Amino acid sequence: MAMRWMIVGWLALLAVPALAAPPVPDTLAQRIKACTSCHGEHGEGGANGYNPRIAGKPALYLYRQLLNFRDGRRHYPLMEHMVARLDDAYLREIAEYFAAQVPPHPAHAVVALTPAQRQRGEALVRHGDAARKLPPCQACHGERLTGVAPAVPALVGLMPDYISAQLGAWRSHTRGAPAPDCMATIAARLDKSDIAAIAGWLASQPLPADMTPAATPTEPPPLECGSIGP
Amino acid sequence: MRRWLLMLVFVLPMAAAQSLPTPASTRAADVVQGEYLARIGDCVACHTARGGKPLAGGRAIATPFGSIYAPNITPDVETGIGSWQRQDFRHAMHNGIGRGGNLLYPAFPFPSFTRVSDADVDAIYAWLRTVPAVHNENTAPDLRWPYSLRPLLMVWRGLYFQPGVYRPDPSRGAQWNRGAYLVEGLGHCNGCHTPRNGLGAIQASQALAGAMMPVENWYAPDLRPGAGGSLDGWSVADIAGFLQSGVSRHGNAFGPMAEVVQRSLQYLSDADAHAIGVYLLDPPPRAPVTPTPPGLVAPPSQARNLFDEGETIYRQNCADCHGDDGQGAGLIYPALAGNRGLLGPDVNAIRAVLLGGFTPSTRANPRPYSMPPFAPVLSDREVAAVVTFIRRSWGNQGSAVAPASVARNRSVPPR
């Protein structure tokens, strides 16, 4: 009798893998297919020139962007829909996941710039324009422009259309951050030609070998900013 | 340095103590119960602006007649309901009349809340007295003429509103009656799931028969059990699990229901969640239902091609998760075979494919799985094809979907 049951048991074990579909992996990567379908399996960014690379951005920066989308400070309808019903803990986990990814960078974009544009872009990024109360980008984003821990993102390694769209979004108030919203203040002082020059110059910079964000800012922030600190 | 450390030592614990909510054990029983009931009534959803302070009002409730801005119901005296007495709050919930006698718009679901018992209303009032007061001025309604004429509410009330209380049906058990009380009262399920007439009044004869939600353009499914109803094949445990977690083997919370589950229904006690299931699976008899139109139906000459194209798209994009035969993967990816939510009006299935997304984070399912959005990669025709295939495979008997129906649902619905 016992023998017969053992045989039945063995047969059942053999039969299970043949009948059941493979189990769905209990991994974060599987859970967030909605994210990776546009941003790439490792957050390397979409091939469409727009969906940005999110891999390796500071976790706190990514987390705050997710909150901004969810809570109505940053607007892009599909992203707002994605995160609308997710809680803080899960959004933080997703942010940390992408922050820890290190997929290779693609070859950087070639952007056609006039010499004057190149000069203007570099001057604004490196030195700002004191007469127009424009601080240099590198004051907050780091001398290597690879961002500053814990919350300031890199400006190199981005696509030109993405950079100009973001600066435009700040000007038109479709992208915002908790007050004081320093980037909104700065973007409002830029005009279209500034934005083209900055985006083009940044996107054509070769990537530094070390893309990790700087540990500390090189100087105190030139403006009060609700999105810099921990 | 030392001074900073000292400050940290003293200030941090104080700050922490201030920000923690009062533990339930030290709060009065009616306040604890009131918080639970307010969650089941989902007060916070309408009375909180996106990214705003809880219950401080300001969210626009879009209606076919214009927008109404839910008011501040925190205990702020100037801008909230800090000066309201218990009787004032009862009057609003039971009769739809605010303090000072102004008639409230039925965007506030007082035609449902009128059934809530005085004891429960008093508990909600007691809890509302304890939430942080927020100074936030109310926004006047933005309604089209003639709906902007507030005295017309008198006429509306005369035609469509009857104050009442929930009267238990003695022929039914306590669990059934509890479910009915929650569904018809505080839960105000009929706010979305029951058709309204041209003046926005809920048509009681069509209770929970399913309805297109105006403005949002979603279909709130027919909640009937049995053949043709969206709950065909659901058990009480399926319904209770769905309400508490947002997922079930028959279908997931999506669209506006995802918000309702996240903000409200996930907090249902096991007993109340089951009571709702018992009631929904055994509802009172109802007049025959006029089915909601399915959307733009593809003509038979197109339907065959759409189906065939849809099958290819399904194999490439959908079968990995939803299975070769639409069988799904348990609570992770819902079955499409026999999934009633995909039939009837086509809008929900189209939106599901276009937008994808996550089911809500809930206590029972805090890290939900998700579906990629296909709006960026599939054309209107391709979406129509795959939805047609899903609606007409594995025993499903929905209509074929015209590509034009996808085109008109392509924009992301407003939040």
Image (cartoon, rainbow, N blue to C red):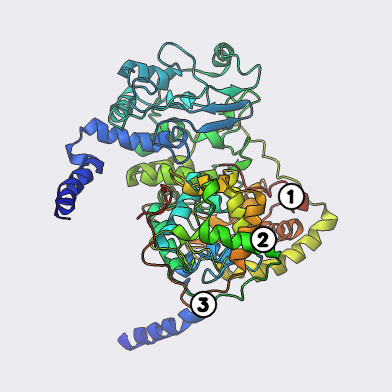
Which one is earlier in the sequence, the residue at label 3 or at label 2? 3
Protein chain holding label 3: A
Could you give the CA–CA distance between mark 1 and mark 3, rounded to whole angstroms?
40 Å
Residue located 31% across and 19% down the image: B86
Asked if residue B341 can be seen in this view, the reply is no
Subunit of mark 2? A
In percent of the image, x 64 and y 29: which residue is there? B64
Measured Cα–Cα span from mark 2 to mark 1: 41 Å
Q: Residue at 34%, 18% (x, y): give it.
A: B84
Q: In x, y percent, where is residue A124? A: 56, 57
Q: Position of residue B241 (x, y in %)?
A: 41, 52
Q: Which amino acid is tagged 3?
A: Leu
Position of residue B174 in the picture relative to residue A12 (left or right):
left
Query: Disc 2 marks which residue?
Result: A117
Name the residue located 50 percent from the left edge and 58 percent from the top edge: A137
Is A34 on the left-hand or right-hand side of B244?
right
Whether residues under marks 2 and 1 lie with C-beta atoms below 8 angstroms apart, the answer is: no
Q: Nearer the viewer, mark 2 or mark 1?
A: 2
Secondary structure under tag 1 reads helix
Q: What amino acid type should be assigned to the residue bearing mark 1?
A: Ala
In which quarter of the view is residue A159 placed?
bottom right
Give the number of marks: 3
The CA span between labels 3 and 2 is: 64 Å
Farthest residue to the right: give it.
B301
Residue position marked by numbered label 3 in the rendering: A19
Q: Chain of mark 1?
A: B
Q: Is residue B303 above or below residue B31?
A: below
Secondary structure of residue under mark 2: helix
Which residue is the site of mark 1?
B407
Q: Are marks 2 and 1 on the same chain?
A: no
Kind of residue sitting beneath label 2: Gln
Q: Same subunit under labels 1 and 3?
A: no
